[in-house]
């Protein structure tokens, strides 16, 4: 079967790519459905057998992990029905987290490609149509099979575990810090020269009502850790700490983190968003060696927001700390 004959479902969640002006109100908001997005891209129907579905109409900032669990279940249904690739359009605010969640929840080899836009359709140079066209090309390509969930923005193809939103507003906002894109699109060709290892899958029932609440706490100069002491009282069951550099915190936070790690999984990431959490270089109080010896789990290459997604889903599936730690290590390659 040629790529142009493949069934590709475009599933719209909202976001800037689908935004329009509101009557009598300032600013834009999600308004366009999946049909409108597809019809705005000249020649898109010639790339594949395009089907559309409007799953939600939300800003990216309003999406939740239960939303993504339901979306993952719907994508599984689509694949069971013979769909050969899925494109998800959504708000860019949370693409790195939603792509990570779908990557953990979907085991199929069929491509799932997430995309969006940095400029709404009414702005000069709106990037949504080009991003959607490229996403369809990738979703219809054999090269994308078995790659897990991918993100296409600005002609680049990123792996879910590495992609970061690295700028607030530019069309070139997305990057794969420390790893680089796995591929790109050019002249309607899909190039994916890099392959990934270490897939991690989390099995959750599609009717799961809640996801384990996991806090994300970022270390800052002079922070005394008082926020950490309040987390159990607020019902959190796990914590991701975005530490300085390769995984460091102020000495005054160490005892609070030690106490938390006795009661719940505490994952140590880097607030830099690029690079790997170290495990054996520094030895001062609050260093990565000190914290790991106290029971914290290294996030490896995952940025803190994606580390939080993994911890929340893994805890919801009943994983133990050893399995959680092994998952972070596997995703680091």
Image: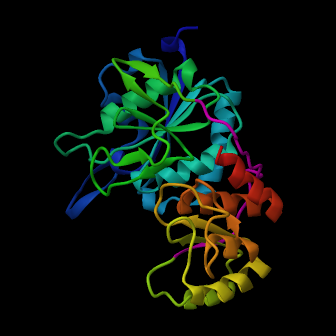
Residue 217 vs residue 325: left or right?
left
Q: Is residue 318 visible?
A: no
Residue located 61% across and 25% down the image: 145
In this rendering, the count of numbered labels is 0
Q: How is the image coloured?
A: rainbow
Q: Measured from the top left, where is residue 159 in percent x and y?
A: 53, 40
Say which quarter of the image contains residue 234. Answer: bottom right
* Principal secondary structure, stretch drawn in magenta: loop
Name the residue nearer the viewer: 148 or 21.
148
Residue 118 vs residue 324: left or right?
left
Classify 150 as above or below 5: below
Say which quarter of the image contains residue 29. Answer: bottom left
Say which quarter of the image contains residue 303. Answer: bottom right
Q: Quadrant of the C terminus?
A: top right
Q: Measured from the top left, where is residue 73 in percent x and y?
A: 68, 44
Name the residue nearer the viewer: 252 or 11.
252
Q: Is residue 6 magenta?
A: no
Q: Is residue 204 magenta?
A: yes
Q: Quadrant of the N terminus?
A: top right
Residue located 57% across and 18% down the image: 142
Classify 25 as above or below 19: below
Residue 49 vs residue 268: left or right?
left
* Residue furthest to the left: 124
Name the residue nearer the viewer: 212 or 162.
162
The stretch of residues the image draws in magenta is 195-218
Q: Is residue 255 visible?
A: yes
Residue 18 vs residue 113: left or right?
left
């Amino acid at each position: 079967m040629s790529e142009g004959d493949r069934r590709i479902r475009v599933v719209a969640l909202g976001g800037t790519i689908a935004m329009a002006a509101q009557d009598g109100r300032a600013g834009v908001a999600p308004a366009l459905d999946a049909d409108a997005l597809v019809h705005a891209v000249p020649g898109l129907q010639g790339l594949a057998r395009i089907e559309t579905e409007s799953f939600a109409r939300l800003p990216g900032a309003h999406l939740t992990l239960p939303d993504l669990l339901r979306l993952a279940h719907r994508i599984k249904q689509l694949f069971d029905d013979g769909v050969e690739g899925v494109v998800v359009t959504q708000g860019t605010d949370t693409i790195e987290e939603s792509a990570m969640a779908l990557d953990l929840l979907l085991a199929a080899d069929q491509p799932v490609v997430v995309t969006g836009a940095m400029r709404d359709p009414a702005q000069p140079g709106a990037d949504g149509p080009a991003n959607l066209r490229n996403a369809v090309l990738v979703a219809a390509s054999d090269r994308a099979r078995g790659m897990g969930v991918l993100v296409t923005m600005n002609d680049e193809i990123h792996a879910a575990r590495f992609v970061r939103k690295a700028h607030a507003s530019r069309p070139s906002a997305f990057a794969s810090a420390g790893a680089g894109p796995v591929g790109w699109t050019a002249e309607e060709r899909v190039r994916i020269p890099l392959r990934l290892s270490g897939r991690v899958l989390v099995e959750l029932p599609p009717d799961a009502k809640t996801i384990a609440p996991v806090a994300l706490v970022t270390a800052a100069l002079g922070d005394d850790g008082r926020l950490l002491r309040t987390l159990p009282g607020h019902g959190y069951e796990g914590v991701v700490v975005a530490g300085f550099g390769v995984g460091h915190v102020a000495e005054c936070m160490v005892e609070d983190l030690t106490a938390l790690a006795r009661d719940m999984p505490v994952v140590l990431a880097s607030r830099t968003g690029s690079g790997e959490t170290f495990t054996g270089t520094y030895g001062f109080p609050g260093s990565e060696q000190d914290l790991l010896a106290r029971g914290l789990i290294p996030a490896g290459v995952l940025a803190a927001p994606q580390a939080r997604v993994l911890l929340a889903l893994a805890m919801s599936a009943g994983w133990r700390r050893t399995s959680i730690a092994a998952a972070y290590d596997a995703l680091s390659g």
